[in-house]
Amino acid sequence: MGNTHPENKKKTTRLPRSKRPPLTHSKTHWPVSWAESVFLPEFPVRGKGHEQRFEKIRELCRGAYGWVHLSKERATGHRFALKVLSKAHVLKEHAIQQCKDEVAIQALLGRHPFIVPCIEHWQSKKHLFLVTPYLPCGELHSIWQALGPFSETLVQILVAELALVIDFLHNMGVIYRDLKMENVLLDNQGHVQLIDFGLARWLGYSSRTTTICGTMQLMAPEILNMQPYGHAADWWSLGVITYALLVGNYPVEACSDHIGMQKLVAEFSYDLPPQFSLAARQLVRKLLCKQPHRRLCSLATLRKEPFFCELNFTDVYEKKIPPLKQLQAEMGHKMGLSVWDFCKTNEKRSDT
């Protein structure tokens, strides 16, 4: 028999929780690879069975690092949007922190009525996964492309909802940096739902950042000029959307690089044509002011604009003014279709 004298037994001591390395607090099964550990703790590690809970129906869109699929939860039959990101692409582009910020921001701030919440997120050996609700009305951009210019009445409600979202993000210390119609979905009452926080980052009110990012046609002049920029850049993007919704096209066409785009923006006069109301022209002029320190860049200022004088922003926030009724009327008049008929036709076209 071996020596079992108490003095010969090795003593093991367990460090207090507060003194253990941070990653040992995770409930993830260890050991994990480096490609898994760098995405912790935001993306917990799950086995392949976790992904198999969802049946992929069709691809909704694809981005820089992966795809978004319309998926069905096998157990319930409920539909979700499943975003799948390739770790290889994320690592190649040095975008680890960007992905971690995306899921942290959307999970934390998804309680806002006009933000699509992140229901669940995890990682496998090769991919990152984010699950959000599926909104069958689709993108604001698709409806705008089909319908053309919106009425001032409809634009008033949609822009007010987007302004409430931007103000909320900025108050929470977040700059969005990619406000565009493709990132705005509509729910079953026509309310806006902001998605895709891939370019969002934490940024305080007095802070500035310098990364050139976003969608070319909606980039603020200070970004295109490679100057430090802050939250005012998001209000410029709202101005471009407001202009496009009213006129039926973007103020300037997109360029292949930010230098060419900067020249076009510098030379363009962002004035609405005279057939629009004075209130609409004044709003667009203030949002699309090329000097960020003079730009309209707060909800408190925007709600005082004559364009919104008859709108109750509390009712807007509480979703008491559904845009769907006005959208239905305009789509029926121009296209002879209901919004739902258009969405079904659009979905069938996507399937094909």
Image (cartoon, grey):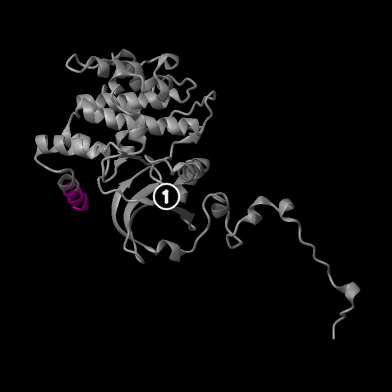
Side (left or right) of 257 relative to 49: left
Image vertical order of residue 20 relative to residue 9, above or below: above
Residue 201 position in % (x across, y down)? 49, 35
Secondary structure under the numbered disc 1 in the rendered image = strand
Q: Quadrant of residue 277?
A: top left
Residue drawn at (50%, 46%) of the image? 91
* Quarter the N terminus occupies: bottom right
Q: Amino acid at mark 1?
A: Leu
As rendered, which of 1 and 46 lies closer to the eye?
46
Residue 6 colored in magenta in the image: no
Name the residue beneath numbered marker 1: 85
Horizontal and vertical percent position of residue 169: 45, 34
* Residue at left offset 25%, top offset 26%: 244
Q: Which of the 4 image quarters holds residue 245?
A: top left
Q: Main secondary structure of the magenta part?
A: helix
Reply above or below: 341 against 276: below
Give how far across and how far down residue 326 sits, in percent.
19, 35
246 over 91 or under it: above or below: above
Q: Nearer the viewer, residue 136 or 101?
A: 136
What is the magenta range?
344-352
| Residue 126 in view (yes/no) | yes
- Which x, y percent locates residue 9? 85, 73
Rendered residue at 54%/54% (across/down):
36
Left or right: where does residue 218 sit relative to residue 87?
A: left
**Would you say residue 250 is visible in this rendering?**
no
- Number of numbered tags placed on the structure image: 1
Residue 199: name its quadrant. Answer: top left
Q: Is residue 320 left or right of residue 230?
A: left
Q: Is residue 341 left or right of residue 217?
A: left
On screen, residue 136 above or below 301? below
Give the class, few, some or many, for how many residues have Cα within 10 Å of label 1's Cα (few <14, many ≥20). Answer: many
Q: Name the residue rendered at 40%, 20% in the picture.
A: 301
